[in-house]
Amino acid sequence: MFVIVAPLLDFDMGSAATESNDTLLGNGVVGILAETCNMWERRAPLTPSHCARLLLGGGNRTRVNRIIVQPSTKRIHHDAQYEDAGCEISEDLSECGLIIGIKQPKLEMILPDRAYAFFSHTHKAQKENMPLLDKILEERVSLFDYELIVGDDGKRLLAFGKFAGRAGLVDFLHGLGQRYLSLGYSTPFLSLGQSHMYPSLAAAKAAVIAVGEEIATFGLPSGICPIVFVFTGVGNVSQGAQEIFKLLPHTFIDAEKLPEVSAAWNLSKQSQSTKRVFQLYGCVVTSRDMVSHKDPTRHFDKADYYAHPEHYAPVFHERIAPYASVIVNCMYWERRFPRLLSISQLQQLMKSGCPLVGICDITCDIGGSIEFVDKSTSIEKPFFRYDPSNNSCHDDMEGNGVICLAVDILPTEFSKEASQHFGNILSKFVASLASMKQLVELPSYLRRACIAHDGRLTSLYEYIPRMRKTMIDLAPAKANPSPDKKYSTLVSLSGHLFDKFLINEALDIIEAAGGSFQLVRCEVGQSIDDTSYSELEVGADDTSTLDKIIDSLTSLANAHGGDDDARKETELALKIGKVNECGTGDTVDKDGPKILILGAGRVCRPAAQFLASYRPDDNNTDQIHVIVASLYQKDAEEIVEGIKNATATQLDVADIGGLSDLVSQVEVVVSLLPASFHAAIARVCIELKKHMVTASYVDESMSNLSQAAKGAGVTILCEMGLDPGIDHMISVKMIDEAHARNGKVKSFTSFCGGLPSPAAANNPLAYKFSWNPAGAVRAGKNPAVYKFLGEAIHVDGSSLYESAKGLRLPELPAFALEHLPNRNSLIYGDLYGITKEASTIYRATLRYEGFSEIMATLSKIGFFDAANHPLLQDANRPTYKGFLDELLNADNISTITTNLNIEASGGYDDELIARILSLGHCKEKDIAVKTVKTIKFLGLHEEIQIPKDCSSAFDVICQRMEQRMAYGHNEQDMVLLHHEVEVEYPDGRPTEKHQATLLEFGKVENGGSTTTAMALTVGVPAAIGALLLLENKVNTKGVIRPLEPEIYIPGVCNVVT
């Protein structure tokens, strides 16, 4: 969702910047190629919505005047959709100055004197693509390679790695069910289809979740357990595969624990042959688990391994493979490294009874780390069976051996999401590329991605001809003295040389110091997660210059070195010299527009990240500088940590003088503080004529400021979060589109809820809190009113939970949900202009099914009573058990005579259930059973004293909920928003039902920190609102909601991206 594209270093493009007089470069006409490399390739570099945004933005702003799309009947988005977005459909792209695609086009499609952008796979001198590069040079084409566009962190911005991992694992699970069936076992995997069989990634995930629910409920046959998935590597491919795996009931274990798990299951199988197993095991391994140093006194060192792989021996076949059911291979391999599994090792493993069932080789590394994988497979035939006993391959699933998936075009199976993801980022660069007449006009991160221009390689890629001559020569290197230089030395570089542009930085260091280089040997990684190896003969006229070069290279390696304690991967290692400490300082450019964020809650960081990473279309405009202010400096510093263009400051908003001083220095204020602070902040903004954004509802105190804001020419944009916010924008967009078609809204329903992800919904209520639960519990007592079939339905707060109804969404069949009416739905009829025409107007809160009946019972027991309870006023504090006894005693009968024996091993549950039923707190036994499980889960039966700060039953249950229902480490929350609009037409056209669904999961970063889905869907819309105000795209003044097209059209587009 967040893209940072700050430039790294500027490089001189030399004479390559000279322009041809008859070029079409910079004419603002963009062509989109029809993909021809593979029948399954359905991705597009830009979706119709991206094209519409570029075209509707106007040529002056986006610098894109026309978009011509080559027709394609297999592209995921139909030609008509592009036409509707304002594009032209034509085979002829001769009028286009910029032509973009995904994969390499056919050579005859390369037109002269134009700019092309696609994955060319040429910058590493890949032999099979050198004819393409020759054609590019012959036709004087400016070639931009997506793989070379990197952010300020050195990471590629345009890649499909996670989609390969996601699709690969879904496909493998599909085949795994068939393989197990051929072995005599029926498993839930059998019901799963391949990735391309689902209309969306969400639908595929829902199907996997459904498989997981079946495993959790009915289990797997013990004869095939434990099922252990081993994932190699920790990059994007592995993360994508693990993302799918985590939708199944699972436990991750460390590599050293594999023998213990295997031994425990072997003992279990001997005693319980019919036992069912309700989970899978996962294990993530890296290089340190695959090899060991040949010197037993030496430990594994990643930098040493990359530089001297000959010092290490393979151990994967001894330590990991004997316990694996499935190996998910996500790491690229080079010939200088030991194989993951050789044919002879696999043969020995299978003879000794290894449980290995299959290989999911997402890397599709032919003849690579898994030796027997000597061919790729296709989407239509994704598997082959390898029989180690006779070293033979077969196309069926039945027989001896292991199955293998090796599809080399996996991301296209999720073409819609992959194209959307890709276009979200690419569309930010198209304006610059489409208007570029000279390379020097481009920002450095795009200049660095230009391989060829005006018939020549740009200076960064002049090493390619030398690489073509010496590519993958693994014989011992001969001495090759550098030309015209007196002194030379051999420098060995290994790591992320190409995907993070470290090779360019190294060569720049050499040339800047007056040295020269000759490429002696090179091994290149083929994906973002792979490492490369190069040997350079570096020369200089004197030893002092050479020493300076070596010192600078050593410093570069140190800056990109690894840290085992911090789990930081080594990005660059040198064979020569000692790596010394070298710090690099970050400087923050505080020039340019500034936005102030008030607050330090969870929603602030996504807002700050979005704004700080935004790059204006106008390259002459400075990036936004974000200031985060909080009552405590430390809290603000935690929000901005690691975010460039962001600083932290301390501020007490009650100090109007200090607040005014800070507001006066910025263009827009985003208040993410509690709603009670907004009015005071808004008054300061109005006085200083600064725009403001909040995510809170418009209350009376804010509404009263509208006229003053209009008079000052100030916009106070409120309700710009999730609910309210995203729900407004999607709702009004759907309704306005219906009205534009002369339709009338017959019914409007909106469902929204913040929930735990299915994997985290692991308590009886299937609900968790990332904040104090008091507010959510109180919301369960709010009255509600809505309109249904023309009748106003009133729901009293005391019976809100009883009004809950079940909900199933066809596109998310695995989610068992329920909905409760959300306060006053009728006011939205007025806001959306549908009061007179809609017979049904209903807004609801979502929960997982079963939540409301338990909460209703807890409420009737008395746990939600906020009045001071006599038992909690004494100095002698009761225990939770004693207090529970008191609440479950009818008519305050003495607890001495009716004390529940909650310590009794057999009667505890039955006694509690009977009491709840006899007191009429619920009518059905199964609800009472679930309530008792919840009471026990919350520890409301324990012989522990209740804290002194609990004075009411409400305090007690909120305290226990906060302790027992918090999100655990790496657990994800989920936001689900679903709108349904039924439209009827006076002219007799059939009634239409339109739906919109937003599903967002919390993000777990590599470092283990989690950004919640709720924080993302509240913080990002607020930031989008601030951006619209900063760029003067909102003309309406006063206190407003996001109900106008000038807000909701770009708002929805940005939220989707």
Image: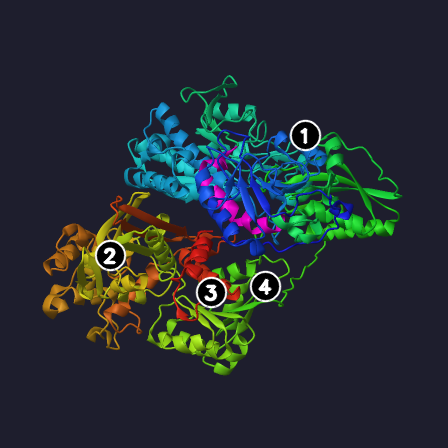
Badge 1 element: helix
Amino acid of disc 1: Pro
Magenta region: 409-433
Q: CA distance from mark 4 to mark 3?
A: 25 Å
Q: Nearer the viewer, mark 4 or mark 3?
A: 3
Q: Is residue 930 magenta?
A: no
Looking at this view, is 1008 or 394 the one in front? 394
Tag 4 near tag 3, CB within 8 Å? no
Q: Looking at the image, which residue is at 72% across and 31% down?
A: 474
1017 horizontally vs 860: left or right:
right
Residue 530 position in % (x across, y down) = 60, 40
Q: CA distance from mark 2 to mark 3?
A: 29 Å
Q: Which residue bears the numbered disc 4?
A: 645
Q: Which residue bears the numbered disc 1?
A: 131
Badge 3 element: loop
Mark 2 or 3, nearer chain start: 2
Mark 4 or 2, nearer chain start: 4
Q: Looking at the image, which residue is at 88% across and 43% down?
A: 485
Q: Farthest top residue? A: 390
Residue 591 position in % (x across, y down) = 63, 68
Amino acid of disc 4: Asn
Residue 897 position in % (x across, y down) = 11, 66
Q: State the mark number for residue 1034.
A: 3
